[in-house]
Structures are given as C-alpha cells and as structure tokens.
Image (spheres, grey):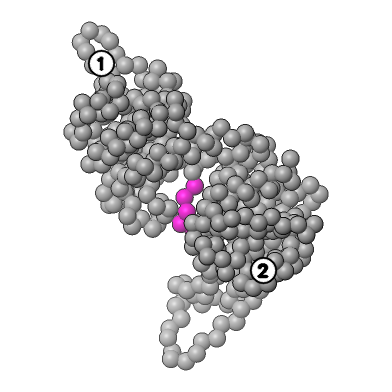
Amino acid sequence: MLEGKKIILGITGSIAAYKAAFLLRLLIKEGAEVQVIITPAGKEFITPVTLSALSNRPVLGAFFENRDGTWHSHVDLGLWADAFVIAPATANTMGKMVTGICDNLLVTTYLSARCPVFIAPAMDLDMFQHPSTIQNIKTLQEWGCHVIEPGTGALASGLSGKGRMEEPEVIVEKLKTFFSDSIKKKTLTGKRVMVTAGPTYESIDPVRFIGNYSSGKMGFAIVEELAARGAQVDLIAGPVHVELSGSVLINRVDVKSARQMYEACCNSFPYCDAAIMAAAVSDYAPAGYHTSKIKRSGENLRIELVANPDIAKEMGQMKRDGQILAGFALETDNEEANAGKKLISKNLDFIVLNSLAQAGAGFMTDTNRITILNRENKKEEFALKSKRDVAVDIVDYLEKLMI
C-alpha cells in the first residue's frame, strides 16, 4: 500500500531518534520513496550518514547546505510529499508547529506541506503530561494532524506508559491503513450519521457509580469507518479511553449518564440520515444522589433504582420516513429471539447481535463476532474479526440501506 508513495520523514532531537532508522528501513521495504529531514538537535542522536545510506538520498538538515547559493526549497518539499511523518516528535518541535516558529527546515516544510501529517510524540512522561504539551497535541489534532501514540488512553487521563514513541512497525501499519482508507470511494459524502458509543455511568455518590464494562471500541471503529467514507458523524460518547483519528468530519459530544446521552441524541438525531446505537446504556439509575461519600456502617445498603430512558426506543418513535436506525443487542441466552424482539419494539431497521457466550466477542476485547438481523427476519452471520473489520461489515450493511 506504500508502493510509490513519497514520504518525508522528519526526525527531531529525542533519544528515540534511533527508532527512526528502523522506521526508515521499513518504509523503504514497503516501496516508499523517503526524504529525511532532520533538525540540528536530531543530529546529536543519530548521524545523517546512517539515514542517507538507508534512504539512498542526501539527508536535509539546513536551508543552505553549501556556500554556493544553492538551497532547499521547503515549498517544493511540501508539494512533493504524499505524507509527512515526524517521528520522533519532541515537545519543542510540536510547540514550534503550533506557534509557527520557523527556525529550521523541518518546521518550515511542515507549514508549507499540503499532504497529511503524522506525528509520533516522544518525551518523558512529565513533559507529556504538562498542560502545554497536551494542548499542543490537541491543537495539532484539531488542525488535521494524525497523532500516533502508544495505547488508546485519552490525552488528559490514563497516561501511564505514554510519552514513548510508538514502535516503527505500528507507524507503518497506520500509514498503510490511512492510504487504504483514502482510496475508498467517498460513498457517504453528504450523509450525516449519529453514533452512540461506550458505557454510561449513573452516579451513586461522588466516588461511586453504576456502569458496565463497555470500552467503546466497537462504536469508535464504526465512527472512523463512516468518516473514511465521507459521512459527517455525530459521536455521542460515554466515559471511555479511546482516541479518534482527528478527522474534521467527526463531531464528538462527551456525556456521562444515560439521561445526558438521551438529551444529546434528541438534539442530533432529527438532523441525521441514520443512527447506529452502539452504546451500552445503563437501564437503571439510583433514585437519589448522595452529595457526600456514603460511609460504611456495617449494615446492608439499599439503593432504589429507577428506569432510565430507553434511548433507542425513543429514537425509533422519533424516526421519520427515510431515516435508518440500527441498534445493538448483547445477549447471554435466547440471543436471536431476544434481539428480534428489540428490533421490533424499538422500531429499528436492523440490529447487530453479539453474544457473551462467544469467545472473543462482547466487552473489553479487540475482536467481535456479530450477526445482523433485519425486519424481514433475515440474518447475516459474520466470522470473528477485529472490531475495525466488523465496523466495515456494519457500515457496508448500513450503506446498502442508505444509497
């Protein structure tokens, strides 16, 4: 998928610069044409001679390499590339990218680039956790940069293990996936789809809640697939630790409780062409909220629960002609019968069934195995796959109903 792709590899002054040599070798092996740009600080960690030998090209590090007036045009470089990968990317370089400080060839080329930009941060954890770094990364994502970090935790939380540069093999796979997605036909351009994802938390007191094990991975994979096909996506996400690609087509609304999710859905669904209700919404919430932490008394504690809104059913009642509504069913027994009842009672067009009895399916996994049922009592079964591939199957099914 990288055959013939022109890639700029930017290397900055991080101890992780040694990984750039492995990344460069992998890119070349995949058939890419790679031009290395290195900052002055980067040369302190890895020599241009090594990089030049791997890329079979001179390594660029300054505007003027000679004293004869020849210079490297950052504009031409920015127009030449199909992708610009900065790995490792230091806090210093990201700060310059955000503020427009063009004191080296790498940052100047970034500001001239018209191609997709990928950034693999590398720094110690304290630097990564600093508010300025977090804000700079968020800003770069908002501007369309693809930030590649190890793991899936959110920027502002779950930072354990963060800061180190992602492994070269993973970066190459992400590039291959990006170019694979980019050649897909934008079959859903002009369509707007709402997706709910993750769990909901129903607070008992300031430190306790009722929730479930949903990670949100399935819903987020669906969102990414919809955006890859050109759809405008309204993502309504419960409390999760999953990152998005940063696509400008995705509008994310974070909620905590089922009632907050319901209100967000009511605001979005009337303006959408379709909705996929992938969230695992709590059916019940505590009748009252304790403003102070409940102390142990040694006696049994009774908590009265009240029913939450049935969001999928409410959307089914709101659904207008031409809108498509899909739901999810996670069952432990009588799976198809129970899913079929939900399909009808909630006025869904199709329902995605996954079973806790199936190994590798359900919550807190990277894989899933689904069956899709429709209102004509027809079903389509799929093999165990990664949730990313399952998302493709689900969006394929949705697309057939929308187009």
In this rendered view, identify the residue nearer to me: 208 or 342: 342
Left or right of 193, for residue 139: left
128 to the left or right of 229: left
User: Which quarter of the picture shows residue 19?
Assistant: top left
Q: Nearer the viewer, residue 56 or 45?
A: 56
Work out which quarter of the rendered image holds the C terminus and state it: top right
Q: Which of marks 1 and 2 is in front?
A: 2
Q: Distance between the residues labelled 1 and 2?
A: 68 Å
Q: Can residue 263 be seen in this view?
A: no
Based on the picture, tell me whether residue 309 belongs to the magenta stretch.
Answer: no
Q: Dot 1, crowdedness within 10 Å: few (<14), some or many (≥20)?
A: some
Q: Where is residue 337 in the image (x, y as percent from the top left)?
A: 72, 69
Q: Residue at x 21, y 26 (%)?
A: 49
Q: Which is nearer the eye, 18 or 321?
A: 18
Q: Mark 1 points at which residue?
A: 64
The answer to whether one can see residue 205 in this image is yes
The image shows residue 308, relative to residue 179, as above or below, that is below
Measured from the top left, where is residue 329 in percent x and y?
65, 64
As drawn, the residue found furthest toward the top would be: 68
Nearest to the observer: residue 333 or residue 244: 333
Q: Could you say whether the residue bearing mark 1 is in a helix, strand or loop?
A: loop
Residue 252 at what x, y percent from top left? Answer: 55, 49
Q: Which residue type does callout 1 highlight?
A: Phe
Q: Would you say 228 lies left or right of 73 here?
A: right
Q: How far across and down, in percent of the image, does residue 171 sit? A: 39, 41
Image: magenta residue range? 239-244
Residue 308 circle label: none
- The residue at which mark 2 appears reads as 335
Pick whichever of labels 1 and 2 is earlier in the sequence: 1
